[in-house]
Image: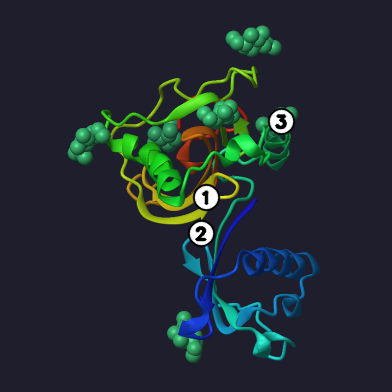
Amino acid sequence: MHWLSILALAGSAAAGSCPRAFLESLTSQYLAAQTAGDPALFPSLAPNGTFIENDVKLARSLCDPHAPGRQHATWHVAAVDSVVTRPGDWAFNATGYLYWDSHENWAVGPYEKVATDRAALQAAADEYFDRFDNTSVVIPLGTPCARLKGGAYTGRGNLTADACDIGGFPNNIKVTNQKYIVDEAAGVVDIFEGFPGLDRSEPTRPVPDSHLFRIINGTIRYIHTVSHCFNTGCGMNGTLFGKRSAKW
Ligand SMILES: *[C@@H]1O[C@H](CO)[C@@H](O)[C@H](O)[C@H]1NC(C)=O
Ligand SMILES: *[C@@H]1O[C@H](CO)[C@@H](O)[C@H](O)[C@H]1NC(C)=O
Ligand SMILES: *[C@@H]1O[C@H](CO)[C@@H](O)[C@H](O)[C@H]1NC(C)=O
Ligand SMILES: *[C@@H]1O[C@H](CO)[C@@H](O)[C@H](O)[C@H]1NC(C)=O
Ligand SMILES: *[C@@H]1O[C@H](CO)[C@@H](O)[C@H](O)[C@H]1NC(C)=O
Ligand SMILES: *[C@@H]1O[C@H](CO)[C@@H](O)[C@H](O)[C@H]1NC(C)=O
């Protein structure tokens, strides 16, 4: 599974804020380039654009310096940052991910638009991680609410009544290096961060991790996590994977 963040920078300081349509076109370009294995399908990438996968800067560049069109673009892509998981990563199960995701409501309708602005959306998502090292923090959890970790679902099988407030939060974990993507129109926040303690085989080293939050009317409804393991199975000796777990 592939969680993506694309950093676009203006070609000139006067260009103002990056248009949403352009950002959406980047995702299409990136997917087309990946699917076809053809870097020319990602013409908005800057000649020196950076690729980062699970916190590692890739030496290989997908960029074709002769790709047509780039020279006309006002905006270009400075960096593509991704959290990528494969078998052996935390609770990895692409089939399970697709299955549970398709049963949740991620639709954007009038009620979701009840405006929560960027700062409020980010604050709600931040509370989740703030709780990880401060038990006084109250996470704004709504109902239904469920966590999908890799492909493992914490929901108890009732998609209208599932709750996230079922304990199992850590109280001494401080995630690091948060990077935010906030989509106000969709009520969605994605936080890329480093999650120490997740990989038991290297407990102090922050694991490259993505937490995606669906926030409706100020409350968190769905949380999807994608977490890399430094060593296969994150040092859990096969005791976690394939099983439903309430922990984290
Ligand atoms: C890429 O090139 C642009 C334009 O020359 C420059 O401003 C930017 O700092 C460069 N980025 C990196 C990562 O080298
Ligand atoms: C992956 O998820 C699917 C759908 O929920 C499930 O049927 C399957 O058993 C899971 N595989 C593993 C290895 O847990
Ligand atoms: C969100 O809040 C509005 C206004 O209070 C309410 O009408 C709407 O039903 C709420 N939506 C959900 C999904 O709870
Ligand atoms: C813990 O959270 C509470 C409630 O938000 C806050 O008042 C307090 O300052 C926090 N403590 C620390 C050490 O951040
Ligand atoms: C889910 O929970 C709600 C509220 O407790 C209940 O009304 C409903 O019957 C439950 N649905 C199923 C399929 O168990
Ligand atoms: C996994 O196995 C190793 C070696 O036996 C052990 O040191 C470690 O505590 C085990 N980890 C867990 C999470 O059980």
Task: Locate residue 202 relative to residue 111 in the image: left or right.
Answer: left
Residue 244 percent coordinates (x, y): 58, 25
Q: Counting residues from the N terminus, which is met first, the one under dot 2 or under dot 1?
A: 2
Coloring applied to the structure: rainbow
Quarter-of-image position of residue 199: top left
- Residues 160 and 49: in front is 160
Say which amino acid is labelled 2: Asn
- Residues 214 and 202: in front is 214
CB atoms at circles 3 and 2 under 8 Å apart? no
Say which amino acid is labelled 3: His
Q: Alpha-carbon distance for marks 2 and 1?
A: 7 Å
Query: Counting other residues with Cα less than 10 Å from the Cα at mark 2, is it few (<14), some (14-19), or many (20 or more)?
Result: many
Q: Alpha-carbon distance for marks 3 and 1?
A: 24 Å
- Which numbered disc covers residue 54? 2
CB atoms at circles 2 and 1 under 8 Å apart? yes
Task: Locate residue 172 relative to residue 220 in the image: left or right.
Answer: left
- Which numbered disc covers residue 26? none
- Residues 141 and 91: in front is 141
Query: Counting other residues with Cα less than 10 Å from the Cα at mark 1, is it few (<14), some (14-19), or many (20 or more)?
Result: many
> Which residue sits at x=60%, y=69%?
19
Is the residue indicated by label 2 positioned so its CB lies within 8 Å of ligand 1? no
> Which residue sits at x=35%, y=47%?
175
- Which numbered disc covers residue 228? 1
> Which residue sits at x=47%, y=62%?
55
Q: Quadrant of ligand 4?
A: top left
Query: Counting other residues with Cα less than 10 Å from the Cα at mark 3, is it few (<14), some (14-19), or many (20 or more)?
Result: few
Residue 223 percent coordinates (x, y): 53, 37
Identify residue for label 3. Answer: 103
Compared to 113, does 147 lie above or below? Answer: above
> Which residue sits at x=65%, y=78%?
44
Is the residue indicated by label 3 positioned so its CB lies within 8 Å of ligand 2? no
